[in-house]
Structures are given as C-alpha cells and as structure tokens.
Amino acid sequence: MEICGVSKATPAMAVEESRLLQVSIFSTLHKNVKYLEFATLLPNIVTIADEVDAQLKQQMLRFMAADAEKSRQPQSHVS
C-alpha cells in the first residue's frame, strides 16, 4: 500500500495478501465445484496462480530495491 508516496506495506504483508487471495479463489471454486467445468477452468486456474506469483515476485523485487537504495544513502546522525 502506498500513501503519499510512502510505502506502508512490508514483505510479510505482501506475502500474506497473496496467500489470502489464493485461498479466497480456491475456496470460492471449492464452494461452487458442482457448477464448474474443469476442462475449461483448469487452464485459467493455472494462469491466475502464475499471475499471483508473478505479482508477488515483482513486489518482493521492489522491496529489495528499496532496501538497497536505503542502504546506499548516507545515514544522517542526530545527536
């Protein structure tokens, strides 16, 4: 989450959000299993799971880049 250009999310929050999204998707599918056509649905499930994973990877790369940038900046010491 970004508010006024300052990220408030943590890597753990991003991972948990991704996990919750996948749990929600699969729970919904499970609840509606009798209405689903698996031959049609399965390729789409794979696509959704791949997309969720790709977005999580991008988020983690952004976190790592932000951490690397912070470590390159000179530290100001307040006495």
Image: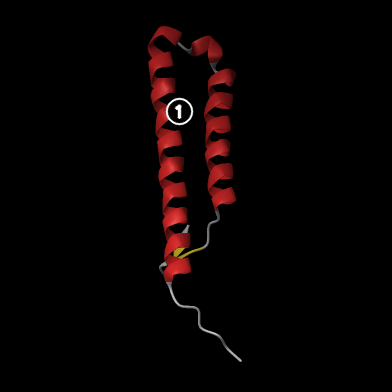
User: Residue 27's x, y, as percent?
Assistant: 59, 25
Q: Is residue 29 above or below residue 1?
A: above
User: Residue 55's x, y, as percent?
Assistant: 41, 41
| Residue at point 39%, 20% (across, down) | 44
Count the marks: 1
User: 2 and 30: which one is in front?
Assistant: 2
User: 53 and 34: which one is in front?
Assistant: 53
Residue that lies at the very extreme toward the bottom in this rendered image: 79
Mark 1 belongs to which amino acid?
A: Ala
User: 49 and 31: which one is in front?
Assistant: 49
User: 57 and 38: which one is in front?
Assistant: 57
Whether residue 9 is visible to the viewer of this picture, yes or no, is yes
User: Residue 21's x, y, as percent?
Assistant: 53, 36
Q: Is residue 14 above or below residue 74?
A: above
Q: Image quarter for residue 32? A: top right
Query: Mark 1 — residue?
Result: 49
| Residue at point 40%, 37% (across, down) | 54
Whether residue 37 is visible to the viewer of this picture, yes or no, is no
| Residue at point 61%, 92% (across, down) | 79
User: Residue 28's x, y, as percent?
Assistant: 55, 25
* Figure coloring: secondary structure
Label 1: element kind: helix
